[in-house]
Image (cartoon, helix red, strand yellow):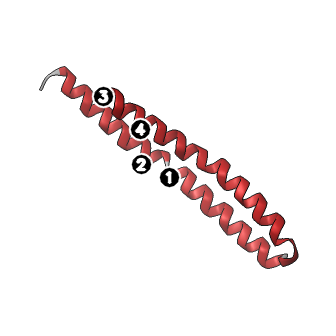
Amino acid sequence: MEIESYAKVAAFLGAAFAMGIGTIGPALGQGLVGSKACENIGKYPESAGKIQTAMMIAMGLVETAAIYALIIAILLIVKAG
C-alpha cells in the first residue's frame, strides 16, 4: 500500500472513532437530563412547562458536542477523499 492509502485509512478510522466516542458523552448526558426532568415533573406537575423549557435548552446544549463530532468526522472524510 502507498502512503496515501494509509492516510485515507487513518482518516476514515479517525472519523469512525470521532463519531463513536464523540457521541457517548452526549447520549449519557441527554439520558440524565431527560431522567431528571421526568422526576421533577412527577414531583412538581404544576411547573411542568418551566421544566420542559429548561430541559429542551439543556438538550440543545448537550447535543452540540455530538454535532461537533459529526463535523470533525465529515471533515476527515472529505479531506481524505
Q: Is residue 33 above or below residue 19?
A: below
Q: Amino acid at mark 3?
A: Ala
Residue at mark 2 to residue at mark 1: CA–CA distance? 7 Å
- What percent of the width, then of the height, locates residue 53? 77, 61
Secondary structure under tag 2 reads helix
Which of the two discs, 3 and 2, sits closer to the camera?
A: 3
Q: Residues within 10 Å of mark 2 (few under 14, many from 20)?
A: some
Q: Earlier in the sequence, mark 3 or mark 2?
A: 2
Q: CA distance from mark 4 to mark 1?
A: 15 Å
SS type, badge 4: helix
Q: Which marked residue is nearer to the observer: mark 2 or mark 4?
A: 4
Residue at figure coordinates x 76%, y 65% from the top left? 52
Task: Tell me whether circle 2 and circle 1 mark residues in contact (CB < 8 Å).
Answer: yes
Q: Which residue is mark 1?
A: 24
- Residue depicted at 66% across the width and 51% down the height: 60
Location of mark 3 (residue): 80
Eye-nearest disc, 4 or 1:
4
The residues tagged by marks 3 and 2 sit, at their Cα atoms, a distance apart of 19 Å
Left or right, 10 with respect to 24, comes to left
When asked about the image quadrant of residue 40, the answer is bottom right
Numbered tag placed on residue 33 in the rendering: none
Question: Which residue matches tag 4?
Answer: 73
Q: Badge 1: how crowded within 10 Å, few (<14), some, or many (20+)?
A: few
Q: Position of residue 55 (x, y in %)?
A: 73, 60
